[in-house]
Amino acid sequence: MGWCFLVCLFSFIFISVYAQNGKANVTVKGTVFIDGKNPIASTSSNFICATLDWWPPEKCDYGTCSWANSSLLNLDLKNKIFLNAVKAFSPLKIRLGGTLEDRVIYQTEDNLHAPCKPFTQNSSELFGFTEGCLSLARWDELNSFFNQSGALIVFGLNALNGKSILPNSSAVGAWNSSNAASFIRYTVKKGYNIYGWELGNELCGTGVGVRVAAANYAFDTIALNDIIDYAYRGLFKPLTIAPGGFFEPDWFGEFIALTENTLDIVTQHIYNLGPGVDEHIIEKIVNPSYLSGGAGLFIQLQDTLKRSETSTTAWVGESGGAYNSGRNHVSNTFVYSFWYLDQLGMASVYDTKTYCRQTLIGGNYGLLNTTTFVPNPDYYSALLWHRLMGSNVLSTNFTGTNMIRAYAHCAKQSQGITLLLINLDSHTTVQATVNFNGTSAYVHGHRKTVVQKPHCKEPTQTIREEYHLTPKDGNIQSQTVLLNGKPLIVDSSGAIPALNPVTVPLSKPVTVVPRSIVFVHMPNVSLPACMQIRR
Ligand SMILES: *[C@@H]1O[C@H](CO)[C@@H](O)[C@H](O)[C@H]1NC(C)=O
Ligand SMILES: *[C@@H]1O[C@H](CO)[C@@H](O)[C@H](O)[C@H]1NC(C)=O
Ligand SMILES: *[C@@H]1O[C@H](CO)[C@@H](O)[C@H](O)[C@H]1NC(C)=O
Ligand SMILES: *[C@@H]1O[C@H](CO)[C@@H](O)[C@H](O)[C@H]1NC(C)=O
Ligand SMILES: *[C@@H]1O[C@H](CO)[C@@H](O)[C@H](O)[C@H]1NC(C)=O
Ligand SMILES: *[C@@H]1O[C@H](CO)[C@@H](O)[C@H](O)[C@H]1NC(C)=O
Ligand SMILES: *[C@@H]1O[C@H](CO)[C@@H](O)[C@H](O)[C@H]1NC(C)=O
Ligand SMILES: *[C@@H]1O[C@H](CO)[C@@H](O)[C@H](O)[C@H]1NC(C)=O
Ligand SMILES: *[C@@H]1O[C@H](CO)[C@@H](O)[C@H](O)[C@H]1NC(C)=O
Ligand SMILES: CC(=O)N[C@H]1CO[C@H](CO)[C@@H](O)[C@@H]1O
């Protein structure tokens, strides 16, 4: 027993239509094909990452100001929900950066009495704000929070320091690294764990506001790597990361070639849903061809890396979907998980090692509500991914309807696998069977060869675990998500709720109701692809 489900895997499709009040609900049968022989890619075991930004409360877009006190300089680090939300990942990668990182000055120990002022708005200044200062006292507080919450920190350093900005927006001259070097030395001296040091934000290619040529950027990145090597001599060395900007093939190709033995991680930013002011973002999110179009950036960066001799790997260093702070009632609601989880799925397929969501908190696209710290639906999507999806990525496709997005990885906490199905359609329920594409699967520890037989008899005792996510009241713009029908809510002590699955016999098809998401953990299915370690 236990392998029966593997044999009743016919991909014939039938459609049944029942009409009610003129609206038809459709049930479609479909098949998930998983190639269990070899993994096609692998992610870091801590793939999920989120960002904290510098934007002050005065940062506004299209007349609304959505950042409140979510800046690194003023965020409430004593908030209980905040601590619990980060701790729940143990560890969560957090990238500290954003537009204003290139305008930050770090306080230094030999200059503790000089004024250390925050950013102030001034439209004639680059990016609309004056330079802002990070005090060492605030850096101490932040590190105390990161230590308590067990976060892995990537810090984005000021790459414009010392450069001159020409009238054509090119920043030229060498990076003056002395302020950053002093900050790194202080960090090492205090024993603060930093996972990676990143150089600059959105200065590559055509740049956002200002650009730096690839050769110049490579020179600065090598300088940063030397500073890190020296500051951490005899210690575990953090990663050297750059350039944190939008992918352009020529610029990235040149930069990667010039930093071959220096750069650990190449970071790209993604905002493929357009500006937050767009009223049609939801239409883009529920359109499968629009979503699939997002694969292009992952493919191109992977190709650029493959063509070079480098051992550098790719991350998404920042991705918020809709730029200029996201869109209220969209990027902080259930529907955004369709885009977000689909991005995580595609990024993994093309060997992206880590994916940093803009933001953990701040703007309209926070995993946490900017003022209450209460998790938005995407927070739970991220947490389920983090707990269920392992490193090895399996080749997966779905036949039956193009409105299902399907991804599978080896499981994180078992020898099994986890399947992610996203149903974009508003009226189609999908009944999905799983086909392992002719590979041998092990169930119950006994080797069973997958053969196709016409009938499946009794359901077996073998189970799988399902996590169904739906929006409250069926409203895809709800800020409350239901897990297996129950709302996920933080309690009065600020505790993150347990994420409990329902168990289902392995032999049954997976039911995916309209406009829903399901993670399916199959602990007892073993595939050859999940017994290999892939780089
Ligand atoms: C169709 O699906 C919607 C959404 O799941 C549900 O609210 C409605 O009751 C269904 N209608 C029928 C006839 O099943
Ligand atoms: C930010 O925090 C300060 C100090 O606690 C408070 O006075 C201010 O109202 C807050 N601003 C916003 C936008 O929440
Ligand atoms: C804003 O910045 C410009 C250019 O740096 C400066 O001349 C001006 O005095 C600043 N305005 C204010 C109000 O500080
Ligand atoms: C927290 O700090 C302590 C003392 O410096 C250190 O031993 C520990 O590894 C740190 N934990 C994390 C998660 O950084
Ligand atoms: C910007 O201007 C400088 C100096 O005139 C020139 O060398 C450089 O090529 C220009 N950069 C771009 C991207 O046009
Ligand atoms: C770099 O900046 C420091 C101040 O942080 C300054 O003292 C030093 O002269 C600068 N170096 C160069 C080469 O401009
Ligand atoms: C934060 O939560 C409050 C209360 O639910 C809600 O009114 C507000 O719109 C939320 N803010 C954001 C930016 O999502
Ligand atoms: C799905 O995958 C199976 C086996 O891996 C393959 O035979 C089939 O052609 C694929 N279908 C699509 C639509 O890519
Ligand atoms: C399994 O999938 C691979 C590609 O994903 C394909 O080359 C192979 O033919 C498939 N095998 C079977 C039995 O469908
Ligand atoms: C029959 C069955 O479901 N066996 C095992 C499947 O995996 C889970 C989790 O690892 C075990 O608890 C079951 O005993």
Image (cartoon, rainbow, N blue to C red):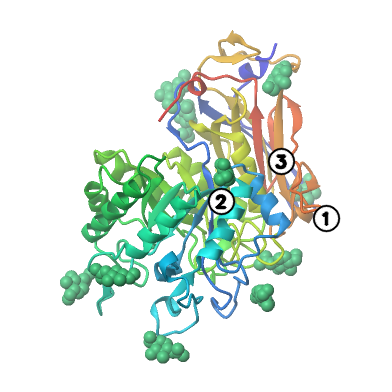
Instruction: Examine the rendered structure and indicate whether residue 282 appears above or below residue 59.
Output: above
**Circle 1 or circle 3, nearest the eye:** 1
In which quadrant of this rendering is ligand 5 seen? bottom left
> Local crowd at mark 2 within 10 Å, few (<14), some, or many (≥20)?
many
User: Which image quadrant for residue 408?
Assistant: top right
User: Looking at the image, is mark 1 or mark 3 earlier in the sequence?
Assistant: 3
Residue tagged by mark 1? 492
Measured as percent of width and height from the top left, residue 333 is found at: 66, 59
User: Which image quadrant for residue 245?
Assistant: bottom left
440 relative to 104 in the view: left or right: right
Q: Which residue is drawn at 79% across and 44% down?
A: 485
489 relative to 389 in the view: left or right: right
Residue type, mark 1 in image: Ser
User: Looking at the image, is mark 2 or mark 3 earlier in the sequence?
Assistant: 2
**Observer-nearest residue: 373 or 248?**
373
Quadrant into which the N terminus falls: top right
Measured as percent of width and height from the top left, residue 301 is found at: 34, 47
Q: Disc 1, disc 2: CB below 8 Å?
A: no
Residue type, mark 3 in image: His
Measured as percent of width and height from the top left, residue 383 is found at: 64, 44
Residue 378 image label: none
Residue tagged by mark 2? 340
> Local crowd at mark 3 within 10 Å, few (<14), some, or many (≥20)?
many
**Observer-nearest residue: 428 or 263?**
263
Residue tagged by mark 3? 468
Between the C-alphas of marks 1 and 2, the distance is: 28 Å
